[in-house]
Each structure stands twice: as C-alpha cells, then as structure tokens.
C-alpha cells in the first residue's frame, strides 16, 4: 500500500474535491502533484474552500495554533540583516573616501613639486610614509571638521532667520 493518496480519487464527477481528498490534503498524504492540483482548485472553488475550512475548524485547538510565535525571531533576524547591510555600506563608503583622499594627496604632490623641493632644500629630512599619512589624515579630518562647523553655522543662521521672521510676523498681526 502506498503512503500517498491516489490522485484519481481526488475529484468527484462534478469537479469538486472528494471528502477523502480533503482529508488527504489535511493529513498531508497527497503527493506533490495532488497537493498542487488541490491548492489550485481551492483557489477558485468557494464550495470546496468552505468545506476545507470547516474541516480545519473541527481540528483540535492545539493543531490550529502554531507551536511558538515566530515574529520576534524573524524581527531579530531582520534587524541583524539590516545592521549588516548598513554597516557594509558605510564601511565601503568610508574606505572609498579614504582611498580617494590618499590618491588625491599623491596626485597633489606631483613629480615637479618634489623635484623643485629637492632643488631648493636638498638637505631637508625625508618624511616617512607613516608621517605623511598621519599629516594627510589629520588634514582631512581638520577639513571635515571645518565643513561640519560651517554646516552647523549655516543651519544656526537659518534657524535664527526663521525665528526672526516668525517674531516679526507675530508683531505685525498684533
């Protein structure tokens, strides 16, 4: 005897699912093709869907509810994935910015400038790569700090102008 339900007995002469077919669908003894055919039939046949719903409602309450709530676990996984994606984006962007500024620093100290410096100051001590990188990065951070300071100053000026404008409008209305 086969573990699966016979697909020939799934539908009756009128084209509806048989009672045995509904029980086989509920018990999970349909093979893949039978389950697909039954699911497709339930998607458009309200009569069979009502019978299947009543069959499920007659099941014990312990079978109707999931074993545990999966929402917190799924939400935690979504938070972790979002954190990883955002971290990867910011790390990639930061690496690209650092690389761009390093290349910009290399390009700004062209061969002609270096040769001119050597001709003018032949006894000047050589700067190691670490010292050069340190001055370049500190210069970058100083420039970034100035940019943020200017942005903050512009935002404060705009806010002051809005407050002044609101105060003058309220004075006109009185």
Image: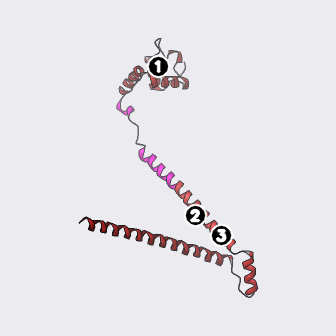
Q: Give coordinates of residue 143: x percent, y percent.
A: 55, 74
* Image quadrant in which the C terminus is located: bottom left
Tell me which residue sits at (52%, 56%) in the image: 86
What is the x, y in percent for residue 147? 51, 71
Label 1 CA crowd tier, 10 Å (few <14, some 14–19, many 20+): many
Mark 2 to mark 3 CA distance (whole Å): 15 Å
**Residue 71 pos. (x, y %):** 42, 44
- Residue 156's place in the image compared with 54, above or below, is below
Number of the front mark, 1 or 2: 2
Magenta span includes 79:
yes
Q: In the image, 101: left or right of 161?
A: right
**Side of 56 where 98 appears, left or right:** right
Few, some or many residues within 10 Å of mark 2 (<14, 14–19, 20+): few
Q: Nearer the viewer, residue 100 or 28?
A: 100
Query: Can residue 121 be spotted in the picture?
Result: no
Q: Residue at x 67, y 68 (%)?
A: 103
Mark 2 highlights which residue? 94
Instruction: Identify the mark nearer the N-term, 1 or 2.
Output: 1
Q: Earlier in the sequence, mark 1 or mark 3?
A: 1
């Amino acid at each position: 005897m086969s573990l699966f339900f016979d697909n020939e007995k799934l539908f009756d002469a009128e084209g509806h699912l048989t009672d045995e077919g509904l029980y086989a669908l509920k018990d999970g003894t349909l093979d893949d093709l039978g389950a697909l055919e039954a699911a497709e039939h339930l998607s458009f046949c309200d009569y069979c869907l009502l019978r299947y719903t009543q069959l499920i409602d007659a099941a014990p309450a312990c079978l109707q509810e999931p074993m545990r709530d999966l929402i917190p676990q799924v939400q935690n996984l979504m938070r972790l994935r979002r954190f990883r994606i955002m971290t990867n984006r910011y790390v990639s962007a930061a690496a690209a910015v650092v690389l761009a500024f390093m290349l910009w620093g290399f390009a700004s100290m062209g061969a002609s400038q270096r040769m001119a410096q050597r001709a003018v100051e032949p006894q000047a001590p050589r700067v190691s790569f670490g010292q050069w990188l340190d001055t370049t990065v500190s210069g970058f951070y100083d420039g970034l700090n100035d940019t943020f300071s200017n942005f903050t100053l512009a935002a404060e000026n705009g806010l002051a102008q809005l407050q002044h404008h609101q105060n003058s409008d309220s004075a006109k209305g009185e």
